[in-house]
Image (cartoon, rainbow, N blue to C red):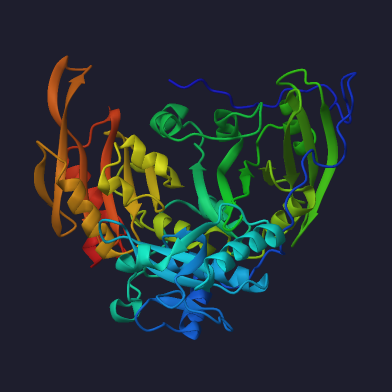
Amino acid sequence: MLPSDTGSGPVFPPLRTGYTAPWPRLSSHRVTEAKTRRNLLIGCGVLGCLGMLMVGGLITGVGVWHVVGQTAEFGEDHPHAVQISEVRSVYHARQMQERLEVMGVESEISAVRDAEGAGLWYVVLAGATDDPAAVRETRQLLQNTHQLDGLELVNWYDLAVRVVDQEIGGIEEQALVVANTPHVGSDVVEVVQRYPYSNVFNVERLTVYLSPGEGESLSRYGTFLNVVGSDLPRGTTRNLILGQTLAWSEAILTDNLYGDRVTLNVLKLKPDHGIEGDVADYYSQRILDTGRYTTELVDPFDVMGTERLIGNKVTIEPRAGTFRVYVILVDPTGGWVYFSQSTEKTDEELKEVLALIGRSNGMFEYSEFYNTFHTIPDVRKAGDSFLGFNMDRLRSAYARNKGNKQWAKQCVGHWSANGFFHNTESGAWSFGIFDLLTSTAAGATYDLYGDTTTGNKVLEVYGASGWVVNEQRWNKRTYKTYQWPNEVNFRQGRYICMVNNAMDSGWLKQEGLVARANSMQLESAGGYASR
């Protein structure tokens, strides 16, 4: 049973506004000076990028898209170039290219196959030349003028065997999948719509929670909370927020060129949330009450977007010379709360991001979210309740944790996601997916994974062959050990999918797991039954 911390509204002492211990005050400026950034682009989403790809055209034989004015094409005649980035999605690569164009940097995109397998990387290149000295100068110029770090020098002859002719193969990746609105409740939809959208960002991570209703126990969230982490402000726990909200979410947005991160929590408060007094002051005080810090500052902070958000910036110094800064903002109705933090962005840069709230369809503008979130069924099975959803971009650490298996390496750079549910009779269950973007990549990766499995049984799911993974389970009620289905996994379209009984708390039978797998929207609006 999880401890319950519902935040029933105790009266807090007056907020220590402007307080600092008898040590030097923190300057009103940030401790470290951030890199100069270009303005946020609120241009094309993925559909706009699709149009731009068509305008840019495909270059015969090498799969390259050019910015207008590109003078040299990366290839045998100009084999040296600067690699600015590599990403899995052609639409993400195009967004970066648009941003570079605004910065005055001419670039091109080359589609490069994984060293082994069918997955693709889209490599963003600049400064193609036949002069090795010139390409080094280009890299130095990009570093000095635009503060672009981590730039690599690449050679055509190292990549040529892996470059894909996209004009012949076509762009298999679909911008947005076809699906009905997931059955998650209007509160969850409203929360994810509240996020800022800019094509400067990618979604590194997102978790959204549907908070328990009246009389619902927090114990049903046990597996969800154990599997998924959080980075809430100090003094604020997930159990506390689950008790105060109708729904809430935490996301990490990553700058697609510079790597800067912004963590943003969006809370839709219950009408009877139990917080007394000013909401921003309440959460600010909770941060300060977590310790006695060398520096403790609370300064007014406001953002003008589609509406004025008002609150506080809280600065603490947990260790000498190490500062944590949290922004807490509340909308004019008092029903929406935003927590924000970034170790790399200035106050003004953060305000630019937060001012985008309400100017778009939020997370639904990000293809990586849209295409994973819309795998959730639009119709739930009897007794099932939706608890929440989580998505993450997989880094190289994931492959290392899997022993650097080839199937795991082909997942790196893609997004994984999980949906969490509770059934009144069978307990907790969840689904997991890897979005490999194309059927070709998903098929090749799943085949590699299948070669590593032993002792699993083949079954039919979603009209194709999948695997059921059994485990020995001890039933505390019957005092017996059972061979029980723990997971059903399969591949459908661009997705590799798993439907699981959650640890020891889920007791769906095999047919129950398969039924829920068939209800998922895997490039099929309404699921398998609607195909």
Pick the front one: 173 or 327: 173
The C terminus: image quadrant: bottom left
Q: Position of residue 123 (x, y in %)?
A: 45, 64
Pick the front one: 324 or 84: 84
Q: Can I make out residue 378 in this image?
A: yes
Q: Is residue 315 left or right of residue 525?
A: right
Q: Is residue 157 left or right of residue 478?
A: right
The N terminus: image quadrant: top left
Q: Is residue 78 above or below residue 463?
A: below
Q: Is residue 265 above or below residue 348?
A: above
Q: Is residue 275 left or right of residue 509?
A: right
Q: Position of residue 60 (x, y in %)?
A: 37, 84
From this viewpoint, which residue is outermost toward the top? 479
Residue 41 occupies which quadrant of the picture?
bottom right
Pick the front one: 294 or 386: 294
Q: Can I make out residue 285 in this image?
A: no
Q: Is residue 422 above or below residue 5?
A: below
Q: How many marks?
A: 0
Residue at figure coordinates x 55%, y 44% from the top left: 249
Q: Position of residue 21 (x, y in %)?
A: 87, 20
Q: Position of residue 244 (x, y in %)?
A: 61, 35
Residue at figure coordinates x 39%, y 53% from the top left: 414
Q: Is residue 120 above or below residue 244?
A: below
Pick the front one: 56 or 370: 56
Residue at figure coordinates x 19%, y 57% from the top left: 462
